[in-house]
Amino acid sequence: MDIMAALLTVEGRDNPYPLYDEAHRLGAVIDAAEGFVMVPSYDECDHVLRNASFGVWDVDWRGRAWDDEQQRRPSLRSMERSVIYANAPDHGRMRSLISSVFTPRRVAALEPMIEQAVEALLDRVAEAGADGAAVDLMDDFAYQLPVSVICDLLGIPAEDRETFRVLATELAAVLDYVDDLSRLDGADAAWLELELYFGGLFAERRRCPQDDLVSALIAVCDADGSRLSGAELLCNLALLLIAGFETTANLFGNGVRLLFEHPEVGTGLRRGDLRYAGFAEEVLRYDSPVQLTTRIALTDGLSVGDVPVRPGAEIALMIGAANRDARRYEEPERFDPTRTAIGPLSFGAGPHFCVGSVLARTEAAIGFPRLLERFPALAAAGAPTRNQRFVLRGYEHLPVTVT
C-alpha cells in the first residue's frame, strides 16, 4: 500500500518505474490489504485480463460501492453504460456493434484519410517551427491527429473538433485515479457540455443521416433498443471520444521523447535498419500510455497466482509494471526496438481488449515515419511537462524544434 500511495505522488506519476521494481521484489501477486490485490507480473496480469470470471465495475457494482457524492458526479456516470464498464451479457452485445467499425479492413480503408491528416498537420508544424521557433508537439500534432481521425469516424464537423479535444481532455480525468472528487469539477462541466452537444447531433443525424458512426449507431438504437439503448449510445460515444485520442496521443508523445533519449534509434529508423512497427511496440511496452486497470472477482473459488480472492475483491493490474517484468522480458529496463514477440499489455487482453488498438497502431505506423522523414533535425527544445496522470501516462507539453 505504501507503493500504491507513492505511485500517486507527483514524483511517482513522473517516474513510476523504480516503484514497480519494488513491487516486483514483493512477488508476482501481492495481497496488499483486505479485498485488494496488486498484480505487477506479466503472466498473472494476462491471466486475469483473459478470464471472464474477473469483471469490471459495472453499474450494478458501482451502485453498491459508491457513496452519495460519487453518485451525484455527472462525469463519473458519463461512461457507466459503456462497453468499458459492462460485464456479460451486456458487454458482448455492445462490443459486437462497436468492434465492427474497427476491423482491420475498415481501418485500412481509413489510411488515405489518416495520411492526409498527417500531412496537413506536419505542414502546420513546419510553418510554426520555421526559423527554429519552438513547437509544442503535443498541441500541434500528437493530440490533433487522433482527434481528427476519431471525429471523422464519429461525424463531428471540422469546426467543432478543437472544442472536442478540450472537452475530451477534461473528461479523461474520470479514467484516472481521483483522490479528491473536487478535482472532477472540470470533468463534470465537460460532460454536461458534451451531453448537450451529442443531443443536438443526434437530432441532426436523425433528420439527415450521414455515412458516419453516429448515424449508424442511432439507426441501431432506434430500430431495436434492446441492442443499444439511448443511454448506452451516449456513454459509448463519450468513451470512443476519449479512448480514441488520449492513448494514441500519449503513444506519440512518449515515443518522440524516447527518440530524444536514444538518438541512435531515430537514425536506425530513418536508415531503414529498424522497423517502425517494432519501435511502436517497444514504446508501448517501455513507457505504456496505459499504466493500470482494475478488475473485480465476480464468482467464488477464484485466485490470482497463489492468492485466493473472494467475490468483490479488487485486483489492480499494474500494466506498466507487467510490461517491464524480468520474468517475461530480458533486460526489461532497456529500450530495444529490435525485440521480437513483445506482446505489451498496453491495450489489454481478453474480453476487454481495446477495440481501437488497430486504429492506434495504424496512426502510429503512418505518423511516426512521416514525422521523422519530414523533420530530420527534430530535437527537444526544453523540458517536457508530464500530464500528471497515473493511469493515462503521457505529456501535456513536449516542446521541439524542427529546423
Image (cartoon, helix red, strand yellow):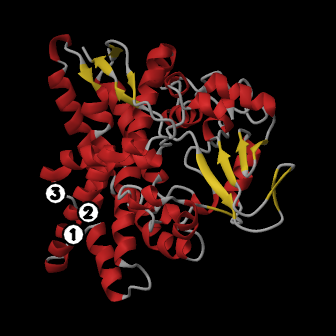
- Rendered-image quadrant of the N terminus: top right
Find disc 1 in the rendering and name its residue: 199
> Mark 1 and mark 2 in contact (Cβ < 8 Å)?
yes
| Residue 113 in sight in this render | no
Q: Secondary structure at mark 3?
A: loop
In the displayed structure, 139 sits above or below 84; it is above
Question: Is 146 on the left or on the right of 54, as rendered?
Answer: left
Q: CA distance from mark 3 to mark 2?
A: 16 Å
In the displayed structure, 8 sits above or below 362; it is above
Could you say which is closer to the camera, residue 18 or residue 112? 18
Q: Which amino acid lies under the numbered mark 3 shown in the image of this protein? A: Pro
Q: CA distance from mark 2 to mark 1?
A: 6 Å
Q: Residue furthest right?
A: 306
Q: First in sequence, mark 3 or 2: give its number.
A: 3
Q: Which amino acid lies under the numbered mark 1 shown in the image of this protein? A: Gly
Question: Is 161 on the left or on the right of 378, as rendered?
Answer: left
In the image, which disc is placed on residue 157?
3
In the image, which disc is placed on residue 195?
2
Q: For the residues carrying marks 3 and 2, which lies nearer the camera in this image?
A: 2
In the image, which disc is placed on residue 276?
none
Q: Picture quarter containing residue 192? A: bottom left
Could you say which is closer to the camera, residue 157 or residue 12? 12
Percent position of residue 83, x then y: 48, 65
